[in-house]
Image (cartoon, rainbow, N blue to C red):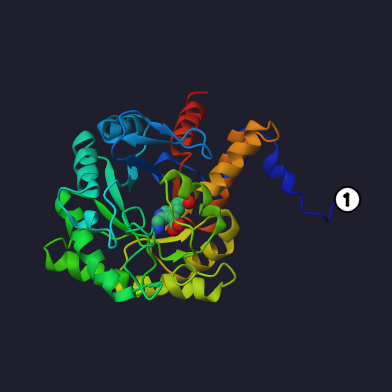
Amino acid sequence: MTDVYRFRRRRKSAAMRDLVRENHLSCDDLILPIFVQEGISEPVTIDSMPGVVRYPESQLAQAVQSAWQLGIKAVLLFGVSEHKDDTGSDTWSDQGLLARMIKTAKQAAPDMLIISDNCFCEYTSHGHCGVVCDHDVDNDQTLANLQKQVVNCARAGVDMIAPSGMMDGMIAAIREALDTAGFTHIPVMSYSTKFASAFYGPFRDAVDSTFKGSRNTYQMDPANGREALAESLEDEAQGADLLMVKPGVAYLDVIKDIRDHSSLPLAVYHVSGEYAMIKAAAQAGVIDEKAIVLETMTAFKRAGANLIITYYARDIAQWLQSQVAS
Ligand code: PBG
């Protein structure tokens, strides 16, 4: 056999495979989500997400510092509020949970990139991502509140704003509010293509959401690929600095499509359900957890994602360190 191309020539040794590997996962790629709950004094475990906890505010500083020590350079803050109302007004109070979390995290690790998840669902009594009118979320009233929220976050010292509510025009509204308030330097990472996904199930546990409805009138239909690209390109046109696809594994085609049509950095959110599925399979002893996680993350990079938001960030940071050491 002489006329066949032998791909195996490049797979013969570990050193050769390392040399020709196309994609690499690094600690620099990772963003760790952190949940903080008001009114608790000890961490609360989340049954569907083993290894993930809701921290009391008093332990946020330590959680951020320990992530920094592992080499994680960015955290995404989620608050579980005790002060819920119709509009989520706690989010634009300078004494509110969102502002307090940002200040605490920033003070604990000044060089860490502190990112706020900017939405209302953890702060509204009904659990929707904005102001409800006639049984639906009112886009423009929600935008006006979102403008107050992001300025509040900027004043508290946030490094990057990450709006996740899938309101139309949210990036333009945020940019205008930040710029007017003198925060022209604060970047916006849009949850630009966010699907109405069953993979968020365990997150609803995590934030203790009483929400039983659907977000189908604002989050995207999982069936739509062309619209998925249009959503992200629209946010780019409105001034987004980073784009995002969420969830991850079921949407690799969307990641690739956006990567091919935009030059912006692209994040992928490996969501709660994706985490929970790997954990459950690992605990059942049917998969190799570390290998599956690293393969999944590398697949995100191959598809074109540049950064990864994942509850596995701490584990990955540790695994990557031990690879260097061995
Ligand atoms: C809030 C928000 C959600 C997630 C992040 N921000 C839930 C939702 O939209 O229902 C999901 C995160 C995850 O599942 O890990 N808008």
Mark 1 CB within 8 Å of ligand 1: no
Q: Nearer the viewer, residue 201 or 172?
A: 201
Res 31 → quadrant: top left
Residue beneath the point at 58% across and 37% down: 279
Question: In the picture, residue 151 is in which quadrant?
Answer: bottom left
Q: Position of residue 268 (x, y in %)?
A: 47, 55
| Number of marks present in the image shown | 1
Where in the figure is residue 22, as x and y percent of width and height? 56, 49
In the rendered image, the residue lying farthest to the top is 326
Tell me the quarter of the picture where residue 86 sits.
bottom left
Q: Is residue 114 visible?
A: yes
Is 176 situated above or below 14? below
Q: Say whether residue 118 is left or right of residue 247.
A: left
Amino acid found under the numbered disc labelled 1: Met
- Residue named by callout 1: 1
Image location (x, y in percent) of residue 277: 60, 43
Name which residue lies at 49% across and 72% down: 229
Left or right placement of residue 283 versus residue 305 in this view: right
Q: Quadrant of ligand 1?
A: bottom left
Q: Give the SS element for disc 1.
A: loop
Residue lying furthest right:
1
Residue 123 position in % (x across, y down): 31, 54
